[in-house]
Image (cartoon, grey):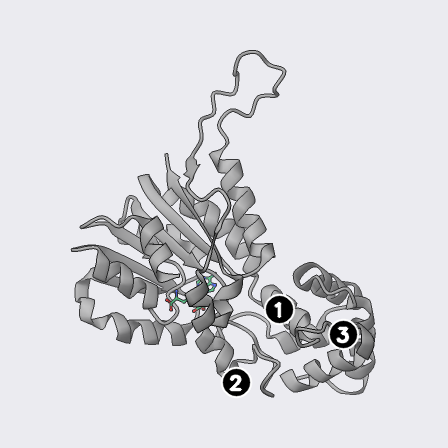
Amino acid sequence: MANEVLHWLQLKPGGLYLDGTLGGGGHSRLILENAVNSRLIGLDRDPAALKEASRVLAPFGGRVSLHHATFDQAGEILQQLGVEGLDGMLLDLGVSSHQLDTAERGFSFRQDAPLDMRMNPLAGMTAAEVVNQADEAELVRIFFEYGEERYSRRIVRKLLQQRAERAIIRTGELAQLVRDAVPGGRRPARIHPATRVFQALRIYVNDELGQVQRGVEAGIYLLKPGGRLVVISFHSLEDRIVKHLFREKAKGCTCPPRLPVCQCDQSPDIKILTRKGVKAGAVEVEQNVRSRSAILRAVERC
Ligand SMILES: C[S@@+](CC[C@H](N)C(=O)[O-])C[C@H]1O[C@@H](n2cnc3c(N)ncnc32)[C@H](O)[C@@H]1O
């Protein structure tokens, strides 16, 4: 969503921008190319992404400052750098194509590999550790809440039987187990039966929803007045959090409607720029099928 990102960020010459999800550095490069003398602070929790982004952004020299961090740590990074406020911030949520396509990262059920799924392979529990150590109720909750998987109980029963015999440590084993647990006639027709379970584990392992909640809220207060925050989500759980946070922060007065005069004295922190959320255009969806689920929302700091 390159054009949409540029449009909604409304770049300024000499502006200061933060890309909280550098990935391969594509959006960051666009920002630097399209805003003369701008500076960019880039974050990613994945050291491999940081390495690739450093290579891609090397031509911009001292205009760029890259950090290995999660985007909910953006405030601390800005403090360390002595930065007061941003003209814009971008969060392009989720995993990158590079992470999905690198089999040994363990994100995909399409390639057999160790069941890892950590965006930062240096920290936290792997998906295999979760699958083999979490109790029944917790696994059902994870698959149901984060994957909206209606056969969660059935899948977890099968998983407990299997792990009692031997640990489940490969993506292929988990994908097959889910396939076996969901009866043929009830399998979703258009997606692989393990899609929802893999999504759920990835969200849990990386605390993706907690990151979005904390990162988006913090981001709003890191902007200068007139600064813009653009968030691209890839599934409804993320988008719901972004939408509700934006609505809450755009609300001014919180007094009950029966009060004739405002007593809370609260004014909105942001103005919502995209009421409905923006989808990728038909041409982009044709070129990159993953952009089909992307939804962009933008706000401006009051
Ligand atoms: C969809 S990709 C971003 C692609 C990027 N916009 C580009 O142009 O190449 C998401 C990236 O964000 C990173 N990421 C996801 N959640 C993060 C978080 N909470 N903090 C920092 N980085 C995160 C992932 O490691 C991945 O590299």
Q: Earlier in the sequence, mark 1 or mark 2?
A: 2
Q: Nearer the viewer, residue 212 or 300?
A: 300
> Between residues 261 and 285, which one lies in front from this camera angle?
285
How far from the left and from the top, in percent, is residue 260? Answer: 57, 11
Position in image of residue 204 (x %, y %): 62, 64
Alpha carbon separation for disc pair 3 and 1? 16 Å
User: Which quadrant, please, contains the C terminus?
Assistant: top left
* In contact (CB < 8 Å): disc 3 and disc 1: no
As drawn, 11 above or below 116: above
For disc 1, the marked residue is 199
Question: In front of the other: label 1 or label 2?
Answer: 1
Is 188 or 272 nearer to us in this picture?
188
Where residue 115 sits in the image (x, y, percent)?
61, 81
Q: Which mark is residue 187?
A: 3
Q: Between tags 3 and 2, which lies in front?
A: 3
- Ligand 1 quadrant? bottom left
Q: Which mark is residue 104?
A: 2
Residue drawn where x is 59% and y is 72% of the image: 125
112 vs 205: above or below: below
Disc 3 crowd rating (10 Å Cα; few below 14, some 14-19, many 20+) is some
Residue 143 lies in what quarter of the image? Answer: bottom right
Q: Circle 3 — which element?
A: loop
